[in-house]
Image: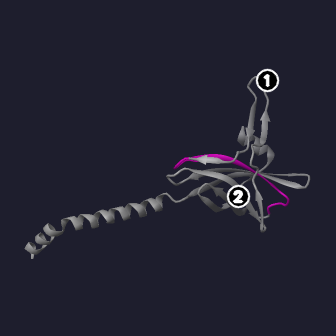
Amino acid sequence: MIKLVVEFFSKNWQGIIAVLGFGISLFNLLYLLKNNRKKIRIRELFYLKLKMTQKYFYEFNLIVTNESRLPISIIDAKILNNGKVYSAKMDRQIIKQHKSKSHPDITFYSSEFPINLSGLDSSKELIVFSLDEEIEKEEFTIIFTTSRGVIKKKVNFVGKEITPNEYMEKTF
């Protein structure tokens, strides 16, 4: 029996190595596909709601984490509220300015799109939305358009609304 196995391996060693090489390549392909898919994690910090004239402005403070090894760019963010889709402000918005005689002026801006994240990177972002109506639920869907496709994430801001005074304290 052992003699037959040795004889089989001695005659077919090239084929056996080829099959093992194919198996290893297939394993690596599946491993890369699993680990490099688009994965973004959102951690909700807090939000501020302001009503001005007939618009509602929402400033969402988020930590966006790219859990993939490949870089990703967030091109656009939209919020889904009562069947309507609202886009985030694309350009930088001045959120607040702090002027002081003893220190240099400080200006806080909202995030500007695109937001570029390298592999396994995190970024704290302030995303501003202008809506025609108030968000009734504090759990809703944010839709991110990225360089690698569309990602829908449910976010939960229950109990995370802050007042303008708390907002000033948290950001200074």
Callout 2, which amino acid?
Phe
Q: Which residue is mark 1?
A: 101
Magenta-colored stretch includes residue 21: no
Of the 4 image quadrants, the one containing the N terminus is bottom left
Q: Which residues are magenta?
A: 118-135
How far apart, in angstroms, are the residues tagged by discs 2 and 1?
37 Å
**What kind of colouring is applied to the model shown?**
one colour
- Indicate the quadrant where residue 106 lies: top right
- Give residue 27's mark: none
* Lower sequence index among marks 2 and 1: 1
> Which residue occupies 27% across, 65% down?
18
Left or right of 62 on screen, residue 11: left
Residue farthest along the right direction in this orientation: 53
Q: Please give the name of the residue rendered at 63% of the width and 61% of the height, measured from the top-left corner.
A: 151
Q: Eyeballing the image, is 17 above or below 105?
A: below
The residue where tag 2 is placed is 157
Out of 129 and 27, give the one closest to the viewer.
27
